[in-house]
Image (cartoon, coloured by chain):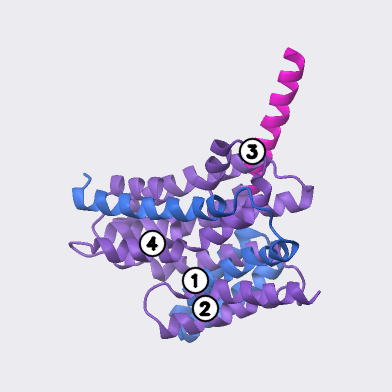
Amino acid sequence: MTFITEQASSAQNSEIQRGIRAVTPILFGLVPVALAFGALASQKGLTASEVSLMTGLNFAGGSEFAAIGLWQAVPPLLLIVAITFLVNSRHLLMGAALTPHLAGLPRWKAYAVLVLMCDESWALGLADARKHRFFSLPFYFGQAVTMYLGWMALSTLGALAGPLLGDIEQYGADLAFPAVFLVLLRGMWPGVVKASPWLASLAVAIAAYLALPGAWYVPLGALTGLGLSWLMAGRT
Amino acid sequence: MIDPWTLIIIIGMATVTVTTRIGGYALLRGRTLSPRLLATMEAAPGCVLIAVIAPHFATGRPADMLALVITVVAALRLPMLPTVMIGMASAAILRQVL
C-alpha cells in the first residue's frame, strides 16, 4: 500500500514539475507584461498592496489592463465591472471547451481547475490533453499555480518599481503581450483550413475594436470564429 | 494602504471574473456534447486568443504595425522568450526611428 502511494505521489510530483517546466518560458515572456501592468497601475495611483489584491483575486490580466485604463481619482465601479465581464466573457467559452476533460472529476476539483483558468494555463492544459489524450490534473495545477503566483508577484514588483521606470512604452513592453499570445497560437496551429475561423475572429475583432467602444471586440470576434467553425463542422 | 472604494471595485471585478470562469462548465456539465459542438470547440482557443490581441493589429501607427509583423514572423519560428525580446526590441527601436 505504502509503496503504491509513494509511487503515485512521485508520479504526481513529476507531473507537477512537468507543468512548471512547460509554463516557465511563458512566465519569462510575461515578465515585461506584468511589470508594465504594475507600473501603469502605480502611475494611476494604486498602491502595491492594491495591485496584489487585484491580481490575486481577479487574476485575469486583460481585464486588469482594461480596468487600469478606466481608472480615475474616483474610479467608476459599474463601468469597470461591466468591462471586466466583457473582456472575460471568453472564459465562458474556455470553460465550455474544458468541460469534456472535467467529466468524472469531483465537482470541487473541477471548480479548482476553472478558478485557476487563464488564457495561458487553459491553452497549455488543452494542448497537453490533446497530445497525451488525457487531462493531467497535476500537470495543470503545476503550471496554473505557477502562472497565478508569477502574475501576482511580478505585477506587484512592477507597482513597486513603476516610479523608477518612467514611461514604459519606450521599452516596447506593450508588445510582449501579443508576442506571448502569438507563440501560444503557433503552438496550436491546426492547418490553414481549420484556422480560417481564427482569421474570421481576428477580422471581426479588429472591425469591432475600431467601431465600438469598450471591449465588445473580444466576444464578437470569438463568437464569429466559433460560428464559422460550427458551419464548417456541419459540412464534414 | 487599501482604499475602501478600490477594494469594492476589486471585489466586483473578481466576482464577475469567477462567474465567467465557472459559468461555461456549470451550464454544460452533465450534458452530452454533440460531435459537431466538440468539433466547433476545437477552434475556440485560437478564436479567443486572437480576438484578445486584435487591438494590436489596429493601432494605425506605422512603427507599431511593423513591430507586430516582425513579432508574428518571430513567433512562427522561435520559442517564447526570444519572440518576446524581439517584439519588445523592435517596438522600442522602431518607435525611436519612425
Q: Amino acid at mark 2?
A: Ala
| N-term-proximal mark, 3 vs 2 | 3
Tell me the element at label 1: helix
Label for residue A205? Answer: 2
- Per the image, the residue denoted by label 4 is A84
- Per the image, the residue denoted by label 3 is A105
Work out whether residue A2 or residue B33 is closer to the camera in this orientation and state it.
B33
Label for residue A218? Answer: 1
Tell me the element at label 3: loop
Q: Amino acid at mark 1?
A: Val
Mark 4 is surrounded, within 10 Å at the Cα level, by few (under 14), some (14 to 19) or many (20 or more) other residues, namely many
| N-term-proximal mark, 1 vs 4 | 4
Q: In this orientation, does residue A77 appear?
A: yes
Residue furthest to the front:
B31
| N-term-proximal mark, 4 vs 2 | 4
Q: Amino acid at mark 4?
A: Thr
Q: Is residue A179 magenta?
A: no
Boundaries of the magenta span? A1-22
Q: Chain of mark 4?
A: A
